[in-house]
Image (spheres, rainbow, N blue to C red):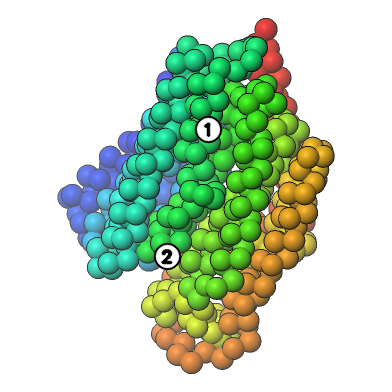
Amino acid sequence: MLTALLPESILLLTALLVLGLGVSAPGARTAAAALTLVGGFLAAAALVFFPVDGNFLGGMIDLDPLARLFKLAILGLGLAAVVFAYESFPVAHFAESLALVLFSVIGMMMLAGTADLLMIFIALELTSIPLYVLAAFDRERPASAEAGLKYFLIGSVSAAFLLYGLSLVYGVTGTTGLAAISRIQGAPDPLLLAGIVFVLAGFAFKVAAVPFQLWVPDVYAGAPTAAAALIASGSKVAGIFILAKILTFGFGHMAGATGWPTTLALMAAASVVLGNVAALAQSNVKRLLAYSAIAHGGYLLIGLASAGTESLPAVLFYVVVYALTTAGAFGVVAVVEKQRSGARLEDFDGLAKTSPVLALCLLVFLISLAGIPPLAGFFGKFYLFASALSNPRLIWLVVLAITMNAVSLYYYLIVLKHAFVLPAANAGAPAHAPASRCLVAALALAVLALGLAPDILLGPLTKAAPAKVATLKTDLR
């Protein structure tokens, strides 16, 4: 069992060392970032070279190839946030900010490796609390304090909804294990129905789904860009993964009796409409990406609403592709902010002339988000919508999503118009951010590679997801 927690233990030790370095040498910015990256790579090596499969402590630790794959994805997104933070985060208390990133990543990884409701709540809070602080970390900007306060207040309310829902589920079923919950037979108790509703409400906040999306634009726009990148990518990956796990492996057999797929379908429809329509009116690129995140949360809910294990690989493929793309887009925004002191549309004017590689990467990210071939976003949407069409009751929802996706192309092209067509009125001094630029380029290549060869990721997911389902069925016997 100790080996099962080796990656998280390495990250915890690294976070404590980084905190110690911040106290003893507050100005050692490069050393703190290097130590964080080394700890992250060691944790990744532990995941790859010391794999552990099994169910420990009654499901509190539940490891399999699927969980390890998502732990790697979360860890990679966390390290990407560290690189962006190195060249864009406030100088004061920089080591402490990196420790907060590591604590949040530990929570996300624990979330991916559990099948117990109590551990899910603990891991969610370990994920969220450092993110609240990171959102408010730039004390020189009132918008950052506002973002942190709104994120904290609404997050606390969502945590209360989730905890109340989990308590109702436990009260009715007498267990917190997903495998044991999936054994419940017969007509569901009304209290269980209420519990499922509260659980969905709590997770809707995490995935930025309507009507729990009000925090997203202000937090994305006000938080330091590196923190916003982690919230938009790593947090969403962990949230969607554990929500898919709960709905598929815990409540999946109750789909017809409880009607939770219909609730998800309505939330998905509202999210894709509101997210795409509201994004049309935005003049700040970070707010535009925030409303885009709401729409993409709706697309992901479509896959979950199909209530079938066949759609699980498509949902997981799409959320990883979305996270890589969004992290890259925020990386571009971080460099532009450093160079031009803003993230308005006008600040992207003439980017193709001043930073052609950066502009090309932005093109890759936005076109992928719009779902244009041959990039990964197109294949992600294709697999997601194709899997949802296996449920005839969702045809209307897929048609709506495709229609609203066409709307999204307009506001993505507006950003590209500023970057490639309009001249720069005030280009500003070139931003010296080599690490961020290199990482952005690497993420753009990854998005392109997953578009040209989606089986690189979809293949392992297609093998790992059915294996998880088979393991669950064995447990149920």
Identify whether 225 is placed above or below 281.
above
Residue 332 image position (x, y, % from top left): 51, 69
Judging depth in this view, the residue of 316 and 293 nearest the camera is 293
Can residue 415 be seen by looking at this rendering?
yes
Number of residue marks: 2
466 left or right of 105 in image: right
Residue 2 image position (x, y, % from top left): 42, 20
Residue 41 image position (x, y, % from top left): 47, 43
Q: Nearer the viewer, mark 2 or mark 1?
A: 1
Name, please, the residue furthest toward the left. 24
Label 2 Cα neighbours within 10 Å, binned few <14 / some 14-19 / many ≥20: many
Residue 221, image quadrant = bottom left
204 left or right of 103 in image: right
222 left or right of 445 in image: left
Residue 360, image quadrant = bottom right
Tell me the distance, in whole angstroms, between the alpha carbons under discs 2 and 1: 30 Å
The residue sitting at 51% across, 61% down in the picture is 290
Residue 254 image position (x, y, % from top left): 65, 23
The residue sitting at 29% across, 46% down in the picture is 18
Amino acid at pointer 1: Val
Which mark is on residue 221? 2
Can residue 63 be seen by looking at this rendering?
no
Q: Which residue is mark 1?
A: 197
Judging depth in this view, the residue of 238 and 219 nearest the camera is 219
The residue sitting at 34% across, 54% down in the picture is 150
Amino acid at pointer 2: Ala
Earlier in the chain: of badge 2 and badge 1, it is: 1
Q: Secondary structure at mark 2?
A: helix
The residue sitting at 62% across, 40% down in the picture is 264
